[in-house]
Amino acid sequence: MTFDIGTPVNTALFVFILYSVQRIVFPSTSRPKEIPHEFRSGYSWLPKSHTPTVLFKSYTPKTLMPFNGIDNERILLAINGTVFDVTAGRNFYGPNGMYGNFAGRDASRGMAKQSFDVEMLTPVDQPLDKLTDLQPDEIENMKGWIEHFSNKYIVCGKLVENDAI
Ligand code: HEM
Ligand SMILES: *[C@@H]1O[C@H](CO)[C@@H](O)[C@H](O)[C@H]1NC(C)=O
């Protein structure tokens, strides 16, 4: 097979190759006048807004309470001193959720004893639940929940005594 520049297909390919090489050797230096925000208007190198960040911080029972899904979009709960952001589990912890009691609270005892009764909750103006009376199987159960929550949600803080901040 001989290369014949004269055939229409070869001419077209040749022109295309020339054009492609030209684009590589002399890349376009023109820039959009505005920073594109959407893919449609070109490559976007700046998102519309910064992605939400989660700040690891200390919560007390009192400062945790507003994150109960009623006063605040965010829902937090604590287990054994670790605060989890369970906003994604609104169906569980929202105002109509089966486990709504835990929202904004220290859920340790309930998780350990597998109960969402209100008696499991320590009043927010009281010292933290020390959990010293828990049985080994209850501690194991709580540990299992901590593992579940660690895999599913974001750890966003720790729970400390009301007078610790
Ligand atoms: C009436 C008996 C109960 C039923 C029918 C039930 C049912 C369920 C169901 C269907 C799920 C969803 C599982 C999933 O989609 O991953 C779930 C999750 C859960 N259950 Fe129960 N449950 C019951 C009792 C309890 C009790 C007594 C507790 C007390 C600690 C509890 C705590 C939880 C927690 C913490 C989750 C995980 C929610 C999450 O992933 O954020 N459940 N339950
Ligand atoms: C609960 O927290 C205490 C103190 O940080 C720790 O010593 C203990 O191992 C934790 N328990 C579980 C079940 O994770």
Image: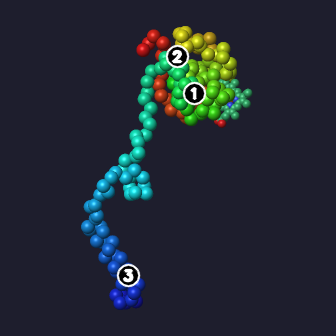
Which quadrant does the C terminus fall into? Answer: top left
Say whether residue 113 is left or right of residue 155.
Answer: right
Say whether residue 72 is left or right of residue 99.
Answer: left
Q: Report the disc number at residue 61.
A: 2
Sequence-wise, the earlier of marks 3 and 2 is 3
Amino acid type, callout 2: Pro
Q: Residue at x 44, y 12 (%)?
A: 164
3 or 1: mark nearer the eye: 1
Amino acid type, callout 1: Gly
Residue 6 rendering spot, x and y as whole percentages: 35, 90
The secondary element bearing badge 3 is classed as: helix
Q: Report the disc number at residue 12.
A: 3
Label 2 environment density (alpha carbons within 10 Å; few <14, some 14–19, many ≥20): many
Q: Residue at x 41, y 45 (%)?
A: 48
Tags 3 and 2 in contact by the CB under 8 Å rule? no
The secondary element bearing badge 1 is classed as: loop
Which quadrant does the N terminus fall into? Answer: bottom left
Label 3 environment density (alpha carbons within 10 Å; few <14, some 14–19, many ≥20): few
Q: Report the disc number at residue 126.
A: none
Marker count (numbered): 3
Where on the picture, by quarter, is residue 53?
top left
Residue 2 rendering spot, x and y as whole percentages: 37, 90
The answer to whether residue 153 is above or below residue 105 is below
The answer to whether residue 5 is above or below residue 88 is below
Where on the picture, by quarter, is residue 15?
bottom left
Answer yes or no: disc 3 within 8 Å of ligand 1. no
- Residue bearing the label numbered 1: 69
